Image (cartoon, grey):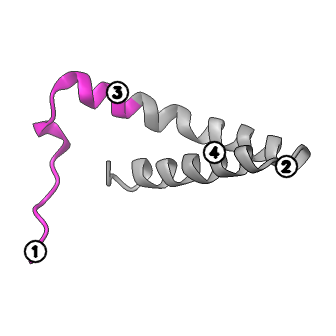
């Protein structure tokens, strides 16, 4: 089955702005969380880092 072409201009304007701002701020948040996990590693912080990393990957590759 072929995947349909993705066109971000078909989204509502508020959703395009939200995606743009999320893409802009996700990398500094992931880097901060990575430094925090490196200094004081806890299970909750590690899980949060993995989830943020997955979210960053999905946002930057236009899957979301």
Let me know if residue 63 is in the magenta part: no
Count neighbours of disc 1 (C-alpha within 10 A) and say few if under 14, some if 14 to 19, many if 20 or more.
few
The image's mark for residue 49 is none
39 in relation to 15, above or below: below
Count neighbours of disc 4 (C-alpha within 10 A) and say few if under 14, some if 14 to 19, many if 20 or more.
some
Residue at 9% x, 78% y is 1
The image's mark for residue 18 is 3
Q: Nearer the viewer, residue 35 or 49?
A: 49
| Among numbered discs 2 and 1, the one appearing first in the sequence | 1
SS state under label 2: loop
Taking the view exactly as shown, the residue that stands out farthest to the right is 39
| Among numbered discs 1 and 4, the one appearing first in the sequence | 1
Give the percent coordinates (x, y) of residue 9: 15, 38
Taking the view exactly as shown, the residue that stands out farthest to the front is 43
The image's mark for residue 41 is 2
The image's mark for residue 48 is 4
- The range drawn in magenta is 1-20
Give the image quarter of residue 61: bottom left
| Among numbered discs 3 and 2, the one appearing first in the sequence | 3
């Amino acid at each position: 089955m072929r995947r349909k072409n993705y066109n971000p201009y078909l989204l509502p304007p508020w959703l395009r702005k939200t995606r743009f701002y999320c893409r802009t701020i996700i990398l500094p948040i992931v880097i901060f969380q990575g430094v925090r996990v490196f200094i004081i590693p806890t299970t909750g912080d590690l899980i949060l880092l993995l989830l943020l990393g997955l979210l960053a990957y999905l946002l930057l590759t236009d899957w979301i």
